[in-house]
Image (cartoon, rainbow, N blue to C red):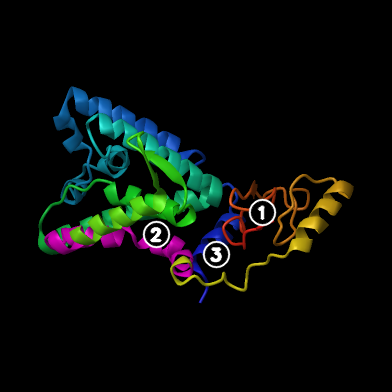
Amino acid sequence: MKDPMRAVNDFCYRHPRFGIPNLMRYIAIGNVAFWLLGMVNPTLISYMSFSPMRVLQGEVWRLFTFFFIPENMGFLGLITVYFYYWIGNTLEQQWGTGPFTIYFFSGALLTMLYGVLMALLLQADFYLTPTYVYLAMFFAFAVLYPDMQILLMFILPIKIKYLAYLDAAFFVVGVINKPFPVNLLPVVAMLNFLVFCGAELLRRMGGGRRSSTTIHFRRESRRIRQEQAQQLYRHKCAVCGRTEKDHPELEFRYCSRCQGYHCFCEEHINNHIHFTE
């Protein structure tokens, strides 16, 4: 069976213009605008959240305003907006514009589809926010950068993975304590996290090695440097050897987790064994 993440990368490779560049910048601007709107008139926010029944009754704008509702209407909300902007921007740089766009909107789409389905089956309405869409984004960041350290409340240094453990605990408690069908919303919203990061998460939990489909050996780095001195190209993927000269439609990035200066194409930036020297 084909790896879902590889299928996403293949799709984005065939459609290099797919995606919304700097997506989280627009989401953050919308969050700040709605935060200000909520400060002026908190009641207006209720007209922006996702309500399945009201959408079916014609209030289709909720399909779009749903993304911009901030996590918190206090000052902490602005800090949260910046935090998620930073996380999302980092994921876009790591994965590429196309895969990150798919990741963000697939989580939102799963949330909305589940809300509509439950509303129709139970004849009950729900007001949904993108809380778990952002949480899925944070979990993906934690899988990729578990040992990155941040200052909690600008004071306490803590590694990302410990925050992820804490959020996972609250996630499980919510699934257990909340009534059906609301308790399954987090699970549905996080399915895209399992698709994108499940294999990497299992590898880290098991301490195993990466799939044999990835390529990494030291002499490849030396060979690329020698070729770059002779060829008229600036970027060459350390895995597949493609360059921007032969494939101008590709995007190339440098891996921040590899030691040294190693370049990868958009297909292999998240599918390679990291250089250790």
- Amino acid of disc 1: Phe
Q: Is residue 244 left or right of residue 46?
A: right
Q: Is residue 47 above or below residue 57?
A: above
Looking at the rendered structure, the secondary structure element under dot 3 is helix
The residue where tag 1 is placed is 264
* Residue 150 percent location from the top left of the image: 42, 41
Q: Secondary structure at mark 2?
A: helix
Alpha-carbon distance for marks 2 and 1? 23 Å
Q: Which residue is mark 2?
A: 193
Is residue 117 visible in the rendered image? The answer is: no
The kind of secondary structure element at disc 1 is: strand
> Residue at horizontal 79%, vertical 62%?
219
- Residue 32 is situated, as x and y percent measured from the top left of the image, at 32, 29
Q: Earlier in the sequence, mark 2 or mark 1?
A: 2
Quick one: 156 or 110, which is closer to the camera? Answer: 156
Q: Which residues are magenta?
A: 174-203
Which of the 4 quarters of the picture holds residue 241? Answer: bottom right
The earlier-in-sequence mark between 3 and 2 is 3
List the residue tagged with mark 3.
6
Q: For residue 180: magenta?
A: yes
